[in-house]
Image (cartoon, helix red, strand yellow):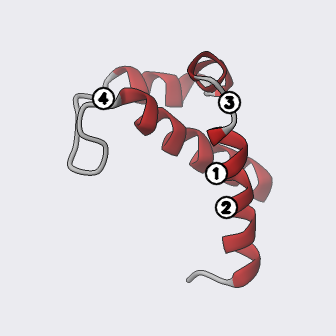
Amino acid sequence: MSNLVNDAIIDGLCQDVADMDKVAVMNALNDANLKKVAGFVGNAKHGANIVDFARDVLVDQMFNDLAQ
């Protein structure tokens, strides 16, 4: 379930990742998520845009890192 604090954190992470260039996004991914992005073949949300997919994966990774 979402709450205002988590929403604010995610919004901030989304902005941080949006400000990164594509090389910085790829460099920030951990090994598991880099493999996930490397295997991307397209989907309904991102079409064939691997960079947008990588940005979403990185936001999830950063949010999970904060929770640990």
Q: Are marks 1 and 2 in contact (CB under 8 Å)?
A: yes
Residue 53's image quarter? top left
Residue sitting at 64 percent across and 51 percent down?
14
Pick the residue in front: 22 or 1.
22
Q: CA distance from mark 1 to mark 3?
A: 10 Å
Instruction: State the image coordinates of residue 43 (x, y, percent, origin top left).
Output: 22, 43
Q: CA distance from mark 4 to mark 1?
A: 20 Å
Residue type at mark 4? Phe
Q: CA distance from mark 4 to mark 2?
A: 23 Å
Q: Secondary structure at mark 4?
A: loop
Residue type at mark 1? Cys
Instruction: State the image coordinates of residue 6 (x, y, percent, origin top left).
Output: 70, 72
Pick the residue in front: 11 or 3.
11
Q: Are marks 1 and 3 in contact (CB under 8 Å)?
A: no
Query: Residue 40 — which label?
Result: 4
Residue type at mark 3? Met
Instruction: State the image coordinates of residue 19 (x, y, percent, origin top left).
Output: 69, 36
Label 3, residues with CA under 10 Å away: few <14, some 14-19, many ≥20? few
Q: Image check: 48 left or right of 26?
A: left
Label 4, residues with CA under 10 Å away: few <14, some 14-19, many ≥20? few
Q: CA distance from mark 1 to mark 2?
A: 6 Å
The residue singled out by tag 1 in the image is 14
The residue singled out by tag 2 in the image is 10
Label whose residue precedes the other's in the sequence (1 or 3): 1
Residue 40's image quarter? top left
Q: CA distance from mark 4 to mark 3?
A: 20 Å
The residue singled out by tag 3 in the image is 20
Residue 4's image quarter? bottom right
Q: Secondary structure at mark 1?
A: helix
Label whose residue precedes the other's in the sequence (2 or 3): 2
